[in-house]
Image: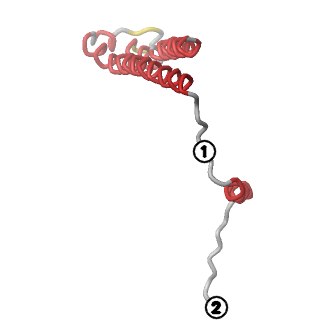
Amino acid sequence: MPNRRVAVMSPQTRLAHARRRQRGRWRLPRLEAADAERALRNYRLQRRRAVAALLLLFAILAGLPVLFALWPALDRTRLAGVPVSWLVLAVGPYPLLIALGHWHLRRAERAERR
């Protein structure tokens, strides 16, 4: 007798498939004209602000090799026996990334409050 193929799935997967059949099609809610315009304006504003944050992120990350190329002495200088260039690479970006995330979040929240 040939081996029979069996589909193995989690019980949660079976439940999700069953729910999908029961509910029918999901429809997007319709917004009133004024709300739709406000939502579109908010979307565009937040997209512009996200592009600015991404550009700053790129500048931070791409700026590290530039920093090391401009100041090769960072490799020779040591702090507690560790080259400063390693410290700048391992520790330096994280406070900047946290500040960038906080800055972007504050700007996004401010845009939503308008």
Q: How is the image coloured?
A: secondary structure
In the image, 9 versus 114, the foreground residue is 114
In the image, 70 versus 48, the foreground residue is 48
| The quarter of the displayed image where residue 73 is located | top left
On screen, residue 9 versus residue 70, left or right, reads right
Circle 1 sits in a helix, a strand or a loop, which is it?
loop
Residue 104 visible at all: yes
Residue for point 47% across, 13% down:
96
Residue for point 44% across, 8% down:
79
Residue for point 32% across, 12% down:
76
Residue for point 36% across, 19% down:
55
Q: Which mark is residue 16?
A: none
Task: State the residue position of label 1.
Answer: 27
Circle 2 sits in a helix, a strand or a loop, which is it?
loop
- Determine crowd level at label 2: few under 14, some 14-19, many 20+ residues with C-alpha closer than 10 A: few
Task: State the residue position of label 2.
Answer: 1
| The quarter of the displayed image where residue 20 is located | bottom right
Residue 98 visible at all: no
Q: Amino acid at mark 2?
A: Met
- From what the image shows, is residue 95 above or below residue 19? above
The extreme bottom residue here reads 1
The location of residue 106, given as percent across then percent down, is 55, 11
